[in-house]
Image (cartoon, rainbow, N blue to C red):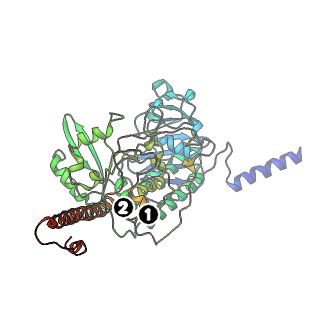
Amino acid sequence: MRFSALALSTAVALVGNLGIALGDCSFDEISLQTTPGFTITIDKEYKILEDTIAKVKYGLYCDSQPKGVDGVDKWFKVPVSSVGVRVPIASGFLEALGHRDALTAADSPGNLTNICLDASKIKSLDSDEQANVDVVFSTDAASDGDKSVRLPTDDSLSPLQKAEWIKFVAAFFNDEKSSDSLFSSISDAYNCHWSNLQNVAHQPHAYWIQYADNNGKPSYNIIDSSYQKSLLAGAGATNDTSKALDDSSDLTKFQNAIKDADFVIDQTNLTEYGKRATEWYSKFGYSDPQNSGVSFLLSRNIWRTDKYTSKSGVSNFPEFGYVRPDLVLQDIISVIEPTYDPGHTRRWMLWLGGTNEDTVAIDADNYDCSSPWISSVTKCTARSDFTGSDPDTSDSSEKPDDSDKDNSGSGSSGRTGKIVGGVVGAFVFVVLGIVGLHYFNRHRRNARIQALRQSDFGGEGINLHDARRFS
């Protein structure tokens, strides 16, 4: 009995000295690499997550809720085991962290695109189901009373700032170290590809655009939010977003503002599936695009971010894309500078310039639930030799990729199209000229020889060998 008491006393001392909390609970202090809009403060008995954008403080504890802590708006016991989501990015964070099984309720379960979720276990997040979850990740901190926690949904944050919210979500699982390691790999890859594209000799022009219908009044917008601007700059593109219109209803001014574009990325809500290219041209007022003289229309470099979808057609981008900005950047680079990494497989960038809309439904062929690519980062190799895709490469006039089949033309870049088109046109003109001259001279020669032969029947004759000098 004396030995048992001593052993118990020693064990308690060890637990206290190591700072280990019972109940599978520990607090790991991590740092933030960007300024994402939240902070994490660690105390011995709790941690405080402060959403500095919405000005809300969440207290997280393991055993019993601390007393006398001022300024905390909501308390949560962690780690949580059951989660509801009202924003797609929350599902993506859970998948990347390996906590997909914790997702038990969603605002619209049918709109989740993660094929690894057990659909039979995910309930609709109504008022009754709120009581069965520990936390609800939502668009605001007030949607579900004491259960709701806000995640960012707009594009005012840069790609890395938005992705770093994975650490915020991880805190509810006491999984900060895993999230810190994953985000560091994502950040390293993103910054590496960004740096590799900053020596492009001839920067193409690219715009992110959107059409909206505001109560029957059309609105044409050049999007210059931090998220979109950062991705385009990281892909080596440039644009003049100062042309963003004061009057977004003026179609002519909008078309003039983007007419120098080599590429456009569109995020309009298009609904005529199978005919969205036609729908896009109609909404943006391009009735005769191939005779417009506008570079991106001639090369048909119109792109979107909804290539990966669920089987029902819901875009995967808001769910997985925001979690992996490094892959999104590689997608955009593969469009603008295709020779940078010819082996890259696009996930979200969809070519809208063709007659076929080759969206890809996420399934076991492109997403392995036992080894998900959303949580696996390929290391980027730094390089300073890349100065841009060579417009004279034979691959430059091919389709954007093998899946974008369209027999009516190519989706190559405007820069390449103008150069290759000019060279081909000049070559054809010269060949036709040579052929035409040959047949004209042959006709003249034969006619002259025939006339000289006829002189044998009257007039002065001439030797046929001499006649060839006149042909």
- Foreground residue, 92 or 342? 342
* CB atoms of marks 2 and 1 within 8 Å: yes
Which residue is the site of mark 1? 194
Would residue 269 be visible to someone looking at this image? no
Q: What kind of element bears circle 1? A: helix
Position of the N terminus, as image quadrant, is top right
Position of the C terminus, as image quadrant, is bottom left
- Quarter-of-image position of residue 306: top left
Q: Write the residue at 51% across / 39% down.
A: 362
- The single residue placed furthest to the left in the displayed view is 459
Q: At label 1, which amino acid type do we have?
A: Trp
- The single residue placed furthest to the front in the displayed view is 457
Would residue 332 be visible to someone looking at this image? yes
Q: Position of residue 80 (x, y in %)?
A: 58, 39
- The single residue placed furthest to the top in the displayed view is 128
- Foreground residue, 18 or 79? 79
Tell me if mark 2 has few (under 14), some (14-19) or many (20+) residues whose alpha carbon lies within 10 angstroms of its own: some
Q: Write the residue at 34% across / 49% down.
A: 409
Q: Position of residue 340 (x, y in %)?
A: 46, 62
Q: Position of residue 429 (x, y in %)?
A: 25, 62
- Foreground residue, 5 or 149? 149
With 233 as the anchor, is 118 left or right in this view? right
Which residue is the site of mark 2? 233
Marks 2 and 1 sit apart, C-alpha to C-alpha, by: 8 Å
Q: Write the residue at 44% across / 67% down.
A: 195
- Foreground residue, 392 or 470? 470
